[in-house]
Image (spheres, rainbow, N blue to C red):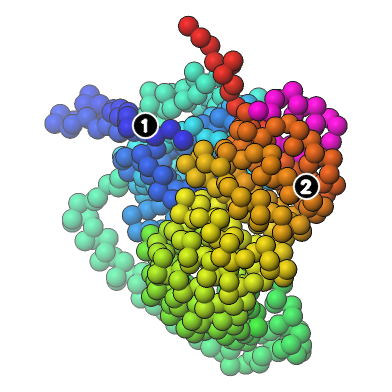
Amino acid sequence: MVSCDETRIELVPIIKDNNYKNGCKEETVTFVEQYVKDVKDFSSQYGSNINIEYHKEVYPIRVSIYETYNPGSVIKISARDSYGQWLLLWSGLPQKVSPKPRIFSPSLKLCSFKTKVLRLEFNHSQLDYYTELDAVLLIGTTELILPHVGFKNRNLSALLQQLGGHSSSSSDDSYNLTPDHTKAHCDLLKLKRTLLSKLGLNCHCIPPIEEAFNSLQQFLQEDFPKLIKDINVSSQSVHDVSANSNTSDICGNFSVLPDETVLKILKNLDLKSLCRICRVNKYFNVIARDALLYTSLNLKPYWNCIDTSALSIIQPRCKYLQRLDLSWCGNYESITSQNFIDFMHSSGCSLTHLRLNCCRFVNDHVVSEISSVCKNLKELCLRNCTSVTTEGFGNLDKLHCLERLELYRTSIETAELCSILKNNKKIRHLNLAGVNDRLNMDEIVGRSKLSRQSEYVPSHVVLDYANGGVGAPGDSLRTFLACCTSLEKVFLSALRGLTDRDIEPLLLCQQLQQLDILGARSLTSDICLRFLLCCPQLRMMDLSFCDAISDTKVQEWRQLYPHVSIKRSFQVSCRDIPRN
């Protein structure tokens, strides 16, 4: 993604001197166009979301996303205010569009606060490969401007569409500015030229003091007594209805059903629906808080509203909590480490699955608490939890039931990992992507004696030896793969020194479904063909940036083996680069 320090500022007049009495100054609106200053946060190696920061706070008018390769994955754009709250500016389904570069610029909802932090969320389900972005342009103003009252919905984006300039001929790609990118923002130019007639500043006319006093006095003498009388009458009516109604009248047929049946029905509802049901009446308020409805909680979709107060509301309902996904939640100090530790004390003893991916509140104290409280933990996901040190990871050897452990982009060291593997011989899924520069894989394989543990046969191992991008893996990888003949998914991306000999043991994996060898410059087409012939369950193979494998071979294999999705991201070979 391009990060550009240049910020373009333009002052556009909205009221001219000759339109008002002498002495009135010209009023202007400041338009700001800026590119990303910094990437504040991101989800994982799979690109589910990214938080980006800009130089200046503005009221957003347009967000233009420069999708260079594989467009169509952006599904949400959100803005963060100064209090840490998020507003959804746009949402949509993933798109299946032409694989050409485009400027994606959807219509935004009205944002009544200034922002300089945006969040983009992605869904790659409709794409053959991951999206690659070059830049994200934010256009906004330093003053809040709105269409005049007469304009439909008072929506600035709708006004821009009416002015024209970024409507695509294809209804499936209506937010594409690329067909005529030189005129991509001509609607904004029209808007600036007609600013006085189309828009108004978000200001209000304050009446004179005498007029305001008279209006207030009239309200207190005439309207206020009537308002109080109406409130009293309404309250008495509600009281009478409540006194003459029983539970059967309020709850309808639900009151006839036993609680067990009602609970079974309510188990089909998501968390948001359960919270709404609590507000229906006293009966539903009680039964919708039953702990049996909260044995599995996925709070990840509600990352923008999960904070300390939300945890405290949920906490009394989590007596039997077994699965918890808090990924993406609590960042920007909306949840502190102590808040989560308190939650673990009251609700963590029954946990078997815990996902805390990209949670900034996870530190050594949190990991220590997890190790002490969650003795039955089978799954622990700590992707991108960069605040945990060696001291924190040293506590994980207290766990003995782990089957899935994800440590992508963490600071785990060789000794701590060996100790964890030694005490958790049932591990079936191990993600060490992005941490291998700290790990000695030869020592890990040797000390944990994986090759001699017949019970250690993982079905899904994620390995990433990004050791400077050039190092060879050594014998550890071959030794490890030789004893794991039941592997289904293997990710060896960014291991440039990988050779045919290193991955030959994988040919014995008859259940192999996915093989990611992205960036392996030394691999030949011979070993790839052997995988296509020897692995009948193979469904995906990523050969992006494998320099020794030609595009011609890839196209040939795609025709011969249509059941295998062979991925090949865009790459430029030396002969494609023009020479002077």
Q: Position of residue 371 (x, y in %)?
A: 50, 77
Task: Judge by depth and name the residue closer to the eye, 61 or 425.
Answer: 425
What secondary structure is marked by label 1?
Answer: loop
Q: Position of residue 494 (x, y in %)?
A: 56, 41
User: How dense is the environment of label 2, judged by Cα within 10 Å: few (below 14), some, or many (20 and up)?
Assistant: some
Disc marking residue 297: none
For residue 179, above or below residue 139: above
Specify the quadrant of the image occupied by residue 5. Answer: top left
The amino acid type of the residue labelled 1 equals Cys
What secondary structure is marked by label 2?
Answer: helix
Q: Position of residue 408 (x, y in %)?
A: 53, 56
For residue 463, above or below residue 14: below
- Check disc 2 and report the residue beneath it: 507
- Check disc 1 and report the residue beneath it: 4
Q: What residue lies at 59% left-to-right and 66% top-to-bottom?
A: 448
The amino acid type of the residue labelled 2 equals Leu
Specify the quadrant of the image occupied by residue 269. Answer: bottom right
Question: Disc 1 versus disc 2: distance between alpha carbons?
Answer: 46 Å
Specify the quadrant of the image occupied by residue 4. Answer: top left
Magenta region, residue range: 548-567
Q: Is residue 87 visible?
A: no
Proximity of marks 1 and 2: CB atoms separated by less than 8 Å: no
Q: What residue lies at 86% left-to-right and 32% top-to-bottom?
A: 560
